Amino acid sequence: MDEEELFDEEPPYTCDPHHNCIDKFIVCQEELMGLFAICPACCERSDSSIVQQEGTFVKIKQVCASCGYHRFWQNQPMLHRNMPTCNLLLSGAIHFTGCLATQTLRMLTLFGLQCISASSFFRHQRRYTIPVIVQAE
């Protein structure tokens, strides 16, 4: 495996079935990116950028020009079919509490929180949350 392939390789992630029980935090983007401003290997300044954002999911790439250190970091594990865990958890929380999805998502967007779209919510509802309810009956 050459260096370019190592650079693009991502760590495998597994999902804890009890991920809903783990606390989640709202973090401002500037503060989050500040955590990647210094290289953990050589303590020099490093470059970082958001390379993927999907609903509540964010993936950051960090590269140090001084020592060559690089990594990818993501804020949550992925479920099957590469679905961010918290995207589905958000849909479930909206659905199972009886909140109106469009109002809830509008409020989160107004707050500036990165969240799923209404179409994602309804897709999750159709594929996951309604089948779980039907199966439980």
Image (cartoon, grey):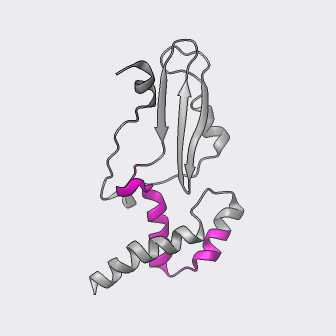
Residue 74 to residue 71: above or below: below
The residue located at (60%, 30%) in the rendering is: 48
Image quarter of residue 37: top right
Residue 93 point in image, percent of width and height: 47, 71
Spot the residue most to the bottom. Answer: 137
The magenta span reads 77-106
The reply to whether residue 22 is visible in this rendering is no
Figure disc tally: 0
Q: Quadrant of the N terminus?
A: top left
Figure check: 26 above or below 8? below
Seen at 58% across and 60% down, the residue is 115
Residue closer to the observer: 87 or 51:
51
> On the rendered structure, is 97 left or right of 50?
left
Residue 111: image location, x then y, percent: 69, 61
Q: Is residue 123 visible?
A: yes
Query: Is residue 107 highlighted in magenta?
Result: no
80 or 99: nearer the eye? 80
Comparing 30 with 48, the one in front is 48
Magenta-colored segment: predominant secondary structure:
helix
Coordinates of residue 131 in the picture (x, y in percent): 35, 79
Q: Which quarter shows the C terminus?
A: bottom left
Instruction: Please tell me which residue is depicted at 33% across the width and 52% down the height of the picture.
Output: 15
What percent of the width, then of the height, locates residue 29?
Answer: 64, 43
Find residue 113 and report its image quarter. Answer: bottom right
Residue found 64% across the figure and 46% down from its top: 28
Is 111 placed left or right of 21 in the picture?
right
Q: Is residue 15 left or right of residue 94?
A: left
Q: Is residue 101 magenta?
A: yes
